Each structure stands twice: as C-alpha cells, then as structure tokens.
C-alpha cells in the first residue's frame, strides 16, 4: 500500500538514518535496495512473532505493519501509513492470500520468492487498493456519510448565522407542541450543564 507520498517519507527516513550513521549521500538504487531490505526484515520479524490464525497491526514510527497469518501458516504483510484504514488492509491481505493459496502449490510457499513464484494478480490488487475509498465499498460509503454530515452541519450553521438562534425559533414555532418544546429545553439544559 505504498503511495508516492509514503515512498518519499520512507526514503527520507532511510536517508536520515544514513546521515546519523555517518554515511554520505545515497544513490536512488541503493536507497531503494535498503528500503526493500528494511521492509522485508520488518515483515519477516512480525510474521515470525505472530501466531497462526491471527491478524495484528504493529506501529513503526509513522507506519502500520498489518500482518495476517492464516492457520495454514501462509502470511502476508501490508505496510501503510497511519491514515490507511486497517480494515481495508486486512481485506486486501485476505483476498491476496486466498487467491495466492489457490494459484500457487503449497509445497512452494516456504521456499518461494518473487523470482521463483509467479503471482501476477498482486500488482492489480496493489494498484486497486492504493485508494481505499475506491477499493472498499464500506470506506466509500463512510466517506460519503462524513461529507454529507459536514454539509448538513455547515448548512445548519449558515441558517443560524443569519441572527437567529435555534432557541428563538423553537419558542416562536407554532408547529411544535408544548411537549416538544419542553423536551428541547430539557435536552438543551442537559447538553449545556450536564446531567442532574
């Protein structure tokens, strides 16, 4: 789940570690290799320390490493920034691991590498899941609800900005019954001053 922005932050983080270690400028190829090594090391460590049948998210600075280890020991790791939804990362992991287990012989899992195992669907999944709103229907619906809530909130504020207060509107209302007005006043009082 690395976007260009995430890749830039990882690159800067590695460069800062190089400078701290007294190293000079790093070429982009060497930097890419070091980032890849670090990500592989971190992923292997997390998988080794995770139990079968578990999902976990491990924080490493500005990133979360989402790991899913299936009961058959097949595991996957997604490294994403803190803002990437965990649920979407685990959905991706489950989908990729399920497809992978059907397409690649189980005997090849422990000894395989990207050079020896061909799984072309991975690039498509990674591309699709770059934007969690587009990849995951729930995330898309939640984002739309959040936008609607903001619009409604702004609309109510703009109505009230015209010099009218909701209290005055409730008092003047002929549509609201006495009970509704009493309910509003009680709720307002509780919201403002707390219960009891």
Image (spheres, rainbow, N blue to C red):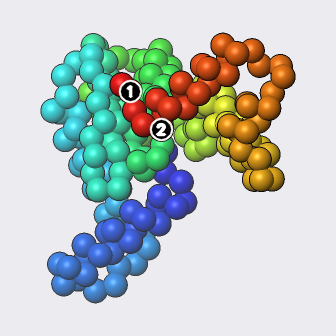
Position above or below: 161 against 75: below
Q: Is 22 in front, or is 80?
A: 80
Q: Residues within 10 Å of mark 2 (few under 14, many from 20)?
A: few
SS for callout 1: loop
Q: Is 189 drawn above or below residue 101 in the view shown?
A: below
Disc 1 marks which residue?
A: 195
User: Would you say the residues marked 1 and 2 are in contact, meaning their CB atoms lie under 8 Å apart?
Assistant: no
Q: Pick the residue in front: 192 or 123.
A: 192
**Gap between marks 1 and 2 measured at Cα:** 9 Å
Q: Which residue is labeled 2 in the image?
A: 192
Q: Residue at x 31, y 36 (%)?
A: 57
Q: Is residue 179 left or right of residue 57?
A: right
On the question of residue 135 being in view, the answer is no
- Residue 16 occupies quadrant: bottom left
Above or below, 170 relative to 180: below
Where, by quadrant of the figure, is residue 25 drawn?
bottom left
Decide if residue 31 is on the left or right side of residue 146: left
What residue lies at 61% left-to-right and 43% top-to-bottom?
131
Question: Can residue 184 be seen from the camera position used here?
Answer: yes
Q: Is residue 28 left or right of residue 181?
A: left
> Residue 50 occupies which quadrant of the picture?
top left
Q: Could you say where residue 81 lies in the image, as x and y percent from the top left?
A: 42, 50
Left-right relation of 14 to 159: left
* Residue depicted at 73% across the width and 31% down the height: 171
């Amino acid at each position: 789940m690395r976007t260009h922005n995430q890749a830039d932050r990882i690159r800067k983080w590695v460069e800062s570690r190089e400078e701290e270690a007294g190293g000079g400028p790093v070429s982009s190829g060497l930097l890419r290799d070091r980032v890849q090594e670090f990500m592989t090391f971190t992923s292997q460590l997390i998988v080794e320390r995770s139990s079968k049948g578990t999902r976990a998210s491990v924080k490493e600075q500005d990133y979360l490493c989402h790991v899913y280890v299936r009961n058959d020991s097949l595991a996957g790791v997604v490294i994403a920034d803190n803002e990437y939804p965990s649920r979407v990362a685990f959905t991706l992991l489950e989908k990729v691991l399920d497809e992978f287990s059907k397409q690649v012989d189980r005997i090849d899992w422990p000894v395989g590498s990207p050079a020896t195992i061909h799984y072309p669907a991975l690039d498509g999944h990674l591309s699709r899941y770059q934007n969690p709103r587009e990849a995951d229907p729930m995330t898309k619906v939640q984002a739309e609800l959040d936008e609607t809530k903001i619009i409604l909130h702004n609309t109510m504020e703009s109505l009230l900005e015209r010099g009218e207060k909701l209290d005055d509107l409730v008092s003047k209302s002929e549509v609201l019954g006495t009970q509704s007005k009493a309910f509003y006043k009680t709720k307002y009082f509780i919201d403002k001053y707390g219960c009891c």
